[in-house]
Amino acid sequence: MRDPRINAIGKGLKRRGRLIAEAVSPPKRTLDAVPAQRSTEAEAAPEPYVAPRAPRLVESPVFVLSSVRSGSTLLRVLLNSHSRIRAPHEMHLRTVHVNLSRDFTADAMKALELDKDEVEHVLWDRLLDLELARSGKELIVDKTPPNTLMWRRLHRCWPEARYIVLLRHPGAVIASLTSRRTDPDHEAIEAEVLSYSEKLEEARQNLACHVITYEDLTAEPEQVTRGICDYLGVPWEPAMLDYGSKDHGTFRPQLGDWSSTIKSGRIQSARQADPNATLSPRLSELAQAWGYPS
């Protein structure tokens, strides 16, 4: 019979040899260590969701498109003096935003067939409807000059909106802005006027709009306001020219013109552009396109 101690010694030697062999052998590659194959084609990003247009409470609002310092506050109070037209102070819809603050909020809105833009459009529409209801009138006009910079979005929001394009000689706009600022940056002012002028020309060329000039509005207010009333489908009212007898709210900065001219309650002649002032070639081109002398 074989001594059991010899068997134990043999098993120990075999186990020791196996451990030594594993220690000196190179590591085995596992499936986790194999690098994933790289895709040869980038995956296409999904198209962003664009919501359908929701119903509007105010289907056909009216927007005055103009540059700053172009007489839009005068036009506002003339229109607001009409018994059927509400033209409040500048509403600044462009700065009214919604915030989809959580990751799942956009999905929640998508389930309601809304996206961020359309939620904002619904809010803007509700603001117009609320102001119109409070006034007891039929038509609402927003005359905020920066609306000019987003006229395409307004048109997308309200396909049936109507537009009054109010022009003023670019040289007169520059002069007015320069006189209102304590330390005017002439280069910045001309760039600002150019940006408004370019958008006005885009709107004039692409929208079925009613075009007037500030110079004509102050020189022939009855004729110009009669044309606006015809465009809006309401009868002209003589009371429109006596805006000083009506309450139009407070005249103050950020809500429109607050100068002594508008506070006077009287239509005053527009200051003309300096004929000796030099405009950039593009502003000169736009002025001529609008019917002003070169």
Image (tube, grey):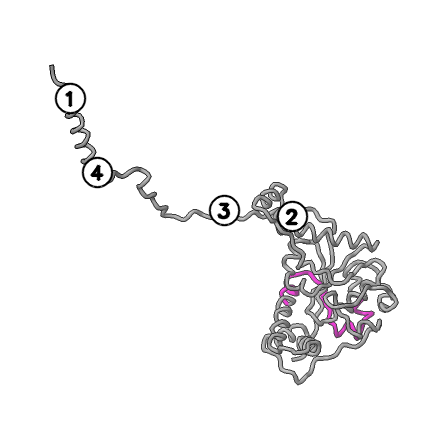
Q: CA distance from mark 2 to mark 1?
A: 91 Å
Query: Is residue 31 in view?
Result: yes
Q: N-terminal of the two: label 2 or label 1?
A: 1
**Which residue, as the protein is rendered here, is positioned at the far top?**
1
User: Pointer 4: what residue?
Assistant: 23
Residue at disc 2, secondary structure: loop
Q: N-terminal of the two: label 3 or label 4?
A: 4
Amino acid carrying mark 4 in the image: Ala
Amino acid carrying mark 3 in the image: Pro
Residue 35 image position (x, y, % from top left): 32, 43
**Quarter that holds the C terminus:** bottom right
Residue 266 image position (x, y, % from top left): 84, 73
Q: N-terminal of the two: label 3 or label 1?
A: 1
Is there a contact, CB below 8 Å, between mark 3 and mark 2?
A: no
User: Pointer 3: what residue?
Assistant: 46
Residue 87 image position (x, y, % from top left): 78, 61
Amino acid carrying mark 2 in the image: Arg
- Mark nearest the camera among 2 and 1 is 1
Residue at disc 4, secondary structure: helix
Residue 161 image position (x, y, % from top left): 71, 56
Q: Which residues are magenta?
A: 201-226
